[in-house]
Each structure stands twice: as C-alpha cells, then as structure tokens.
Image (spheres, rainbow, N blue to C red):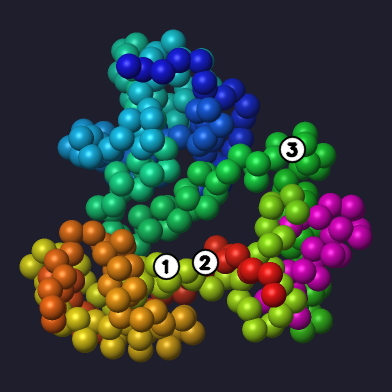
Amino acid sequence: MPKRGYMTQEKFLVNIEGKEVERIEYKGQAVATLRMIDELHERPEGTARRTFHEHKEKLIENEDYIELPYDEWSKNQGVLNGRNSSVQQMGGRRGSMIFLFQSGYLMIVKSFQDDFAWKIQRALVNNYFIAKENLASESERGIPLKELASYITSAMEAARALGLKGSKASLSANEIVRNTIGYDCLELMGATRYFTDDDTDDPFAPTPTEAVACFVEDACVVGPHYKAGKKDLFVDYARYCSEHGYSVEEDSKFFGHLCAVIGNLQIYKVSVRGISLRRKPMTVKREFRPKVVGPK
C-alpha cells in the first residue's frame, strides 16, 4: 500500500556533475525518482523504470523503495519541478509513484558500468544521499554556501602556497576561515573526524572495495563469457594497488570485495568466471571520499 504524509517540503539543491538537482526526502531520507536516474545517467527515458520492474521481486519495499500515492508526491515541489519533473513522467496520470532509497538506487544502476555511470553513482552517493544533518540550509549556516566555498578555496590556495599538503593544508585552510569569518567548515560538514595532523595518514585513500572497483574498471573486462585464473587476478590486483599507492588486501578478502563490486561471479578453486584481465590497463585519475581516522 502506498504510504502517506511523510514527504519533506524543505528545499535543498545538490550539484551532481554540474547539474543542479533538488533533493527529495521521505521521512528525512533522500529518495530518487526513476526519471531522475534516467536523466542524470543520460539513459533513454524509461530505462530505470524497466529495470526496476524487471528486478522488483528482489527489492524490499520500505527499505529499497517506497510507493507513494498521488496526493502525497504531488505536494512536493522537488518532484514537480526541473529534472525531477515526474508529472511528465506520469503522463498526466494521478497514480502512485516509485521513489528509491540509496540501496534501491544502487541495485537499479548495478548494470550501468560505463565511466560516466561510475561518476554519477559516486556523486549521488556522496552528495545526494548523504545524511540530512550534513546538508544544513543556508539560513542555518548564516552564510551562502557559494560565499563560504570561496573563502575555503582561497584559504586552501594560501596553505598550498606555503608548501602545506594533504591533511595539513585542509586543517590550516579551515583554521584560516574560522579565524577570518568565524565558521568551522569541517564542523559544518561533520568532517572533523576525517582529518589528522599526521602526514602518514591519507584521508582521501580509497576504501578496500573502492580500490578493487578501480582495479576492475582500469584493468579488467567483465562479462559472463570471460574467465581468469584466481592467482593471475590477485597478482595483477596487488601490482595495481602497489603502483597506485593503495593498500593490498589478502586474497580471500580481495575476492569478497570483487563479488561485492561485480556480482554474479562464479568463483571456482583456481579460476573466476565473469571477469578477465585487460591486455592494456587504463589509467584514470580519481578522487575518493575521506576515510575515517580513528583515535590514536
């Protein structure tokens, strides 16, 4: 049954790879429309809807998606306006509508494997589906976001001009802004725990799963007809991580992360079906979200 009365009306704009998207919320959690997914991923209209219905039996209602009646979703301007224009999507019908939570979104786009799709997925997960407490409105901040961003950009340039790098540059820039206009940017973003004065820590290092995902994208080809030796895969993965400065996981964990990244892999005693190594690996420069730095 469609749920009622929980859509948030407060407006938040999120930048997704240069496109302004209005954040839609249900019970304080970000949700995405199927039309939004098609437009941001630049897929033909109806692609996300078709994929959703093909795999609907594998999704859990109220956990991966929610179905809302017309009198509920039609009151939310984020649904009615701009890129989220679901009135056009519904063809004028006043029926219920599907909204995806983060887990449902990731399942729907699992088959989107091109480079652009990876960028959009990362941007949506890091910027759109982020917890609401990290998206304080401008009235709560007391300063326009663009103005605050301008201050921190200038402060970062000053820190780097002094030869500071990594965490030290970020912490120093934050201190400059705090002393100049009284705003602690890291605290506003809830990111204080991500940074440390220790130069040995890289707050932007990829997680183990992200490192494996990069290895797959750069050095492998994926498909049901491909096959590779487990030893060859692990050796190339270890070499790839060493070349890029990533931490190397032990082989059992590596194959666990590999299954999480690809899915539908068949792991045998000495081989893996569903993946193979490229002859000429690609190299792509990436930025990763900060990792949490634990207490020392």
Dot 2: few (<14), some (14–19), or many (≥20) neighbours within 10 Å? Answer: some
Residue closer to the observer: 81 or 228: 228
Residue at image mark 3 = 138
Vertical position of residue 267 compared to residue 62: above or below = below
* Residue under the point 70% across and 36% down: 137
* Residue under the point 52% across and 52% down: 126
Indicate whether residue 113 is drawn in magenta.
Answer: no
Q: Are the residues flagged by discs 2 and 1 in contact, CB closer than 8 Å?
A: yes
Element under disc 2: loop
Q: Looking at the image, is mark 1 or mark 3 nearer the viewer?
A: 1
Between the residue at mark 2 and the residue at mark 1, the CA separation in whole angstroms equals 8 Å
Q: Position of residue 36 (x, y in %)?
A: 40, 36
What is the number of the mark on residue 210?
1
In which quadrant is the C terminus drawn?
A: bottom right
Q: Amino acid at mark 3?
A: Glu
Give the mark nearest the N terminus, 2 or 1. 1
Vertical position of residue 105 compared to residue 196: above or below = above
Image: magenta residue range: 164-186
Q: Quadrant of residue 46?
A: top left
In the rendered structure, the answer to whether residue 100 lies left or right of residue 12 reads left
Q: Are the residues flagged by discs 1 and 3 in contact, CB closer than 8 Å?
A: no
